[in-house]
Amino acid sequence: MRAVLAAAVCLLLLAACTTVRPVDGETTPLGKGLDMRLPAAPGYPGHFAASQTVVGNYGERKGAFQAVLDLGPDRAQVVLTAVSGPRILGITWTSAGIVEDRTPLAPEGLKGINVLGDIFVSLWPVEAVQRAMPDGVTVSVEGNVRRVKTADRVVEEIETTEDDGATMRQELRNLDLGYRLTIVTEKDG
Protein backbone atom coordinates (compact mmCIF):
# COMPACT_ATOMS: atom_id res chain seq x y z
CA MET A 1 0.00 0.00 0.00
CA ARG A 2 2.83 2.40 0.83
CA ALA A 3 4.44 1.75 -2.55
CA VAL A 4 1.21 2.59 -4.36
CA LEU A 5 0.78 5.77 -2.31
CA ALA A 6 4.41 6.78 -2.92
CA ALA A 7 4.03 6.16 -6.67
CA ALA A 8 0.85 8.25 -6.76
CA VAL A 9 2.55 11.12 -4.90
CA CYS A 10 5.53 10.96 -7.31
CA LEU A 11 3.23 11.10 -10.32
CA LEU A 12 1.37 14.09 -8.91
CA LEU A 13 4.62 15.92 -8.19
CA LEU A 14 5.93 15.10 -11.66
CA ALA A 15 2.71 16.32 -13.26
CA ALA A 16 2.94 19.57 -11.30
CA CYS A 17 6.24 20.47 -13.01
CA THR A 18 5.52 22.24 -16.27
CA THR A 19 7.46 23.94 -19.02
CA VAL A 20 5.84 26.97 -20.61
CA ARG A 21 7.30 27.93 -23.97
CA PRO A 22 6.25 29.85 -27.04
CA VAL A 23 5.84 27.83 -30.21
CA ASP A 24 8.26 28.87 -32.93
CA GLY A 25 6.11 29.89 -35.91
CA GLU A 26 2.55 29.11 -36.92
CA THR A 27 3.18 26.33 -39.44
CA THR A 28 2.30 22.71 -38.90
CA PRO A 29 2.85 19.67 -41.11
CA LEU A 30 -0.21 18.89 -43.18
CA GLY A 31 1.17 16.13 -45.39
CA LYS A 32 4.31 15.01 -47.18
CA GLY A 33 6.10 18.21 -48.18
CA LEU A 34 3.10 20.35 -47.19
CA ASP A 35 2.86 22.79 -44.29
CA MET A 36 -0.26 24.66 -43.24
CA ARG A 37 0.08 28.20 -41.85
CA LEU A 38 -2.37 29.01 -39.07
CA PRO A 39 -3.73 32.57 -39.01
CA ALA A 40 -2.13 35.12 -36.65
CA ALA A 41 -5.26 35.04 -34.44
CA PRO A 42 -7.64 32.09 -34.06
CA GLY A 43 -10.64 33.83 -35.63
CA TYR A 44 -13.06 31.08 -34.61
CA PRO A 45 -16.57 32.43 -35.30
CA GLY A 46 -18.42 32.81 -32.02
CA HIS A 47 -17.65 30.72 -28.96
CA PHE A 48 -17.20 26.94 -28.87
CA ALA A 49 -16.60 25.01 -25.65
CA ALA A 50 -16.41 21.24 -25.59
CA SER A 51 -14.65 18.20 -24.22
CA GLN A 52 -13.24 15.52 -26.49
CA THR A 53 -12.16 11.93 -26.19
CA VAL A 54 -9.61 11.06 -28.87
CA VAL A 55 -8.27 7.64 -29.83
CA GLY A 56 -5.31 7.81 -32.17
CA ASN A 57 -3.73 5.19 -34.37
CA TYR A 58 -0.21 6.11 -35.46
CA GLY A 59 1.00 3.20 -37.55
CA GLU A 60 1.41 0.32 -35.09
CA ARG A 61 0.98 2.56 -32.04
CA LYS A 62 -2.35 3.39 -30.46
CA GLY A 63 -3.11 5.94 -27.77
CA ALA A 64 -5.98 7.82 -26.19
CA PHE A 65 -6.33 11.19 -24.53
CA GLN A 66 -8.95 13.72 -23.57
CA ALA A 67 -9.08 17.39 -24.52
CA VAL A 68 -10.97 20.42 -23.30
CA LEU A 69 -11.54 23.06 -25.99
CA ASP A 70 -12.40 26.72 -25.50
CA LEU A 71 -12.40 28.42 -28.91
CA GLY A 72 -13.23 32.00 -29.87
CA PRO A 73 -12.26 34.81 -32.22
CA ASP A 74 -9.38 36.16 -30.09
CA ARG A 75 -8.28 33.13 -28.08
CA ALA A 76 -8.23 29.37 -28.49
CA GLN A 77 -7.24 27.18 -25.58
CA VAL A 78 -6.79 23.42 -25.58
CA VAL A 79 -5.88 21.28 -22.57
CA LEU A 80 -4.90 17.64 -23.09
CA THR A 81 -5.04 15.05 -20.32
CA ALA A 82 -4.45 11.35 -20.06
CA VAL A 83 -7.80 9.52 -20.09
CA SER A 84 -9.30 10.30 -16.67
CA GLY A 85 -5.84 11.28 -15.56
CA PRO A 86 -3.33 14.06 -15.18
CA ARG A 87 -2.76 17.04 -17.42
CA ILE A 88 -0.31 16.48 -20.28
CA LEU A 89 -0.25 19.63 -22.38
CA GLY A 90 -1.93 23.03 -22.55
CA ILE A 91 -2.00 25.18 -25.69
CA THR A 92 -3.04 28.83 -25.86
CA TRP A 93 -3.35 30.64 -29.20
CA THR A 94 -3.87 34.41 -29.37
CA SER A 95 -2.72 37.19 -31.69
CA ALA A 96 0.42 37.35 -29.50
CA GLY A 97 1.32 33.81 -30.66
CA ILE A 98 0.99 30.19 -29.62
CA VAL A 99 2.24 29.06 -26.22
CA GLU A 100 2.37 25.49 -24.96
CA ASP A 101 2.48 24.45 -21.33
CA ARG A 102 4.03 20.96 -21.17
CA THR A 103 4.22 18.61 -18.23
CA PRO A 104 6.91 15.92 -18.03
CA LEU A 105 4.17 13.42 -18.98
CA ALA A 106 3.92 14.89 -22.50
CA PRO A 107 5.61 12.60 -25.03
CA GLU A 108 8.49 14.32 -26.84
CA GLY A 109 6.80 13.83 -30.21
CA LEU A 110 3.56 15.52 -29.08
CA LYS A 111 3.58 19.08 -30.35
CA GLY A 112 0.91 21.64 -29.53
CA ILE A 113 1.02 23.20 -32.99
CA ASN A 114 0.20 19.81 -34.56
CA VAL A 115 -2.75 19.34 -32.19
CA LEU A 116 -4.00 22.83 -33.11
CA GLY A 117 -3.61 22.00 -36.80
CA ASP A 118 -5.88 18.95 -36.56
CA ILE A 119 -8.46 20.88 -34.52
CA PHE A 120 -8.32 23.79 -36.97
CA VAL A 121 -8.86 21.61 -40.05
CA SER A 122 -11.72 19.68 -38.46
CA LEU A 123 -13.65 22.46 -36.68
CA TRP A 124 -13.04 25.85 -38.33
CA PRO A 125 -15.16 26.99 -41.29
CA VAL A 126 -13.97 25.65 -44.65
CA GLU A 127 -13.16 29.16 -45.91
CA ALA A 128 -10.75 29.80 -43.01
CA VAL A 129 -9.11 26.40 -43.48
CA GLN A 130 -8.69 27.05 -47.21
CA ARG A 131 -6.90 30.35 -46.51
CA ALA A 132 -4.38 28.49 -44.31
CA MET A 133 -3.49 25.98 -47.03
CA PRO A 134 -0.35 26.19 -49.15
CA ASP A 135 -0.63 26.87 -52.88
CA GLY A 136 -2.08 23.94 -54.81
CA VAL A 137 -4.00 22.48 -51.84
CA THR A 138 -7.80 22.67 -51.77
CA VAL A 139 -10.42 21.97 -49.12
CA SER A 140 -13.80 20.64 -50.16
CA VAL A 141 -16.87 19.22 -48.47
CA GLU A 142 -18.87 16.40 -49.99
CA GLY A 143 -21.76 15.35 -47.79
CA ASN A 144 -20.32 14.72 -44.34
CA VAL A 145 -16.66 14.45 -45.47
CA ARG A 146 -14.18 17.32 -45.55
CA ARG A 147 -11.22 16.61 -47.84
CA VAL A 148 -7.86 18.31 -48.09
CA LYS A 149 -6.24 17.44 -51.42
CA THR A 150 -3.66 18.33 -54.00
CA ALA A 151 -4.07 17.84 -57.75
CA ASP A 152 -2.86 14.24 -57.47
CA ARG A 153 -3.89 12.95 -54.02
CA VAL A 154 -6.13 13.22 -50.98
CA VAL A 155 -3.96 14.35 -48.08
CA GLU A 156 -6.50 14.28 -45.25
CA GLU A 157 -10.18 13.44 -44.70
CA ILE A 158 -12.43 14.36 -41.81
CA GLU A 159 -15.70 12.44 -41.77
CA THR A 160 -18.46 13.48 -39.39
CA THR A 161 -20.38 10.28 -38.68
CA GLU A 162 -22.70 11.75 -36.04
CA ASP A 163 -23.75 15.25 -35.00
CA ASP A 164 -26.91 15.69 -32.98
CA GLY A 165 -26.08 19.20 -31.79
CA ALA A 166 -24.74 18.04 -28.41
CA THR A 167 -22.38 15.24 -29.46
CA MET A 168 -20.29 14.96 -32.59
CA ARG A 169 -18.26 11.96 -33.74
CA GLN A 170 -15.52 12.45 -36.34
CA GLU A 171 -12.92 10.26 -38.00
CA LEU A 172 -9.80 12.18 -39.06
CA ARG A 173 -7.56 10.27 -41.46
CA ASN A 174 -4.25 11.80 -42.50
CA LEU A 175 -3.39 9.62 -45.49
CA ASP A 176 -0.03 11.32 -46.12
CA LEU A 177 1.32 11.13 -42.57
CA GLY A 178 -0.28 7.77 -41.75
CA TYR A 179 -2.43 8.40 -38.71
CA ARG A 180 -6.11 8.19 -37.81
CA LEU A 181 -8.00 9.89 -34.98
CA THR A 182 -11.45 8.94 -33.74
CA ILE A 183 -12.83 12.03 -32.01
CA VAL A 184 -15.96 12.23 -29.87
CA THR A 185 -16.84 15.84 -29.04
CA GLU A 186 -19.34 16.69 -26.34
CA LYS A 187 -20.35 20.33 -26.63
CA ASP A 188 -20.82 22.37 -23.45
CA GLY A 189 -24.13 24.13 -23.01
Image (cartoon, grey):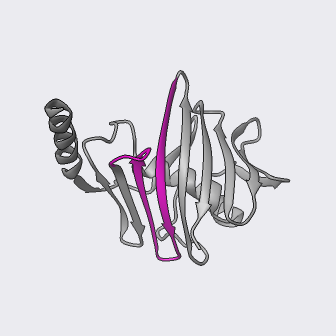
Q: Examine the rendered structure and indicate whether residue 170 appears above or below residue 179.
A: below
Residue closest to the far top: 60
| Residue sitting at the far right | 143
Front residue of this view, candidates 12 and 120: 12
Q: Is residue 105 left or right of residue 67?
A: left
Q: Quadrant of residue 82?
A: top left
Q: How many marks?
A: 0
Tell me if residue 81 can be seen.
yes
Q: Nearer the viewer, residue 142 or 79?
A: 79
Horizontal and vertical percent for residue 178? 59, 30
Q: What main secondary structure does the magenta stretch of the protein show?
A: strand
Point 21% across, 46% down: residue: 12
Which segment did they paint magenta? 61-86
Residue 21 placement (x, y as % from top left): 26, 56
Q: Is residue 142 left or right of residue 148?
A: right
Residue 86 location (% of width, % of height): 33, 48
Residue at 60% x, 60% y is: 186
Relative vertical location of residue 95 with respect to residue 54 in this rendering, above or below: below
- Residue 35 visible at all: no
Q: Is residue 68 magenta?
A: yes
Q: Position of residue 134 (x, y in %)?
A: 61, 51
